[in-house]
Image (tube, grey):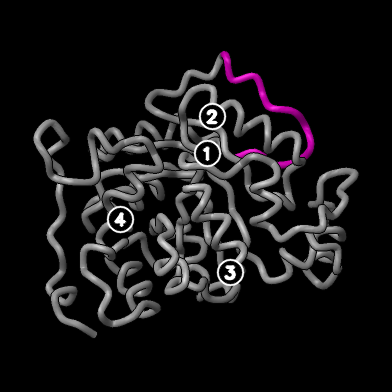
Amino acid sequence: VCRADVEGAAAAARNSGTCFVADVVGREAVMVRSVLEAEGIGGHLFRELSGWRGLPDFSAADWRGPWSPSVHALYSTAPALAREAKGWCVSRDLPFSLHLAEAPGENELFLGRGGEFAEFLRARRILPKGFVPPGLSAVAYASELGLLDGRTLAVHCVHVDEADIGILVRSGAGICLCPRSNGHIGVGEAPVAALHAAGATLCLGTDSLASNDDLDLWAELRAVRALLPTDIPLWDLLAMVTTHPAKVLGLGGEYGSLEAGKRAVWAVLPPDFFVRP
């Protein structure tokens, strides 16, 4: 990852009104943190893990600012590692993140039905060693592993049914929708209206510039608005980029709303949001 590219991305996010980001990183964590600090943007860094090895020793990690481990996805991460990473976060009251029910065929893989996605993963040796289908949907599997609670950010949740939605809502997990990214890479459309109606804690993300045109959350909010009833309250939309993510990330005391004692950061709402579609 080139520092200049990260600087450009951070500046673009800031200029569109973003004051805090949750970013998935690898070895470039120190560089990303320094860029965010230079741009005046807060950030929680998720150190993404995958594979079948155990949890790394983070005792020597010298990363400024808030961070915690996350896992890529349940099809690319051994269940023991996923549980260990989540346990690490729970013991320190830190957020946890994973891609969940994003890909077509993900549920079929876990249900043991095979399919193109399963063959794709096996051919590339992405599946953890000794993988055995749990006979559950992706969401139900994540729940069985103890990965879902109010400090978990479940990213995408495109392929979820009514039972999955119930599990997500009862767990209190934040669901990070990425509608433009989903459209760009052709994985489908999340049942946003059903999730909202069920009372899910919805958040919005851009995924990354690898699968999106830009990092503008207003554009993301317009995309998700098109998937919701036209009479949805404006506040419900704004909560997806303010109070909800602040709650899941444990930042409700500093960010998410303009209140006494919190950081005085805000963005100007584009005028088209005041017009019903």
Q: Distance between the residues labelled 1 and 3?
A: 24 Å
Q: Is the magenta stretch mostly helix, strand or loop?
A: loop
- Residue 241 appears left or right of 133: left
Residue designated by label 3: 162
Residue 241: assigned label: 4
Q: Does the magenta stretch include residue 229?
A: no
Sequence-earlier tag: 4 or 2: 2
> Please, is residue 150 above or below residue 37 in the view?
below
Going from N to C along the chain, the mark reached first, 1 or 2, is: 2
CA distance for labels 4 and 3 = 24 Å
Measure the alpha-carbon separation of dots 1 and 2. 6 Å
Kind of residue indicated by mark 2: Cys
Are circles 1 and 2 on residues that touch, CB within 8 Å? Answer: yes
For the residue carrying disc 1, how many other residues have a C-alpha within 10 Å: few (<14), some (14-19), or many (20+)?
many
Horizontal side of residue 63 vs 255, given as left or right: right
Quickly name the residue at label 1.
96
> SS for tag 4?
loop
Q: In the depicted view, which residue is nearer to us: 191 or 6?
A: 191
| Amino acid carrying mark 4 in the image | Val
Question: Going 68% across and 71% down the picture, which residue do you hit?
Answer: 104
Residue 89: assigned label? 2
Between 42 and 191, the one lying in front of the other is 191
Q: Give the range drawn in magenta.
A: 48-59
The span from disc 2 to disc 3 (Cα, nearest Å) is: 28 Å
Foreground pick, 272 / 9: 272
Quarter assignment of residue 205: bottom left
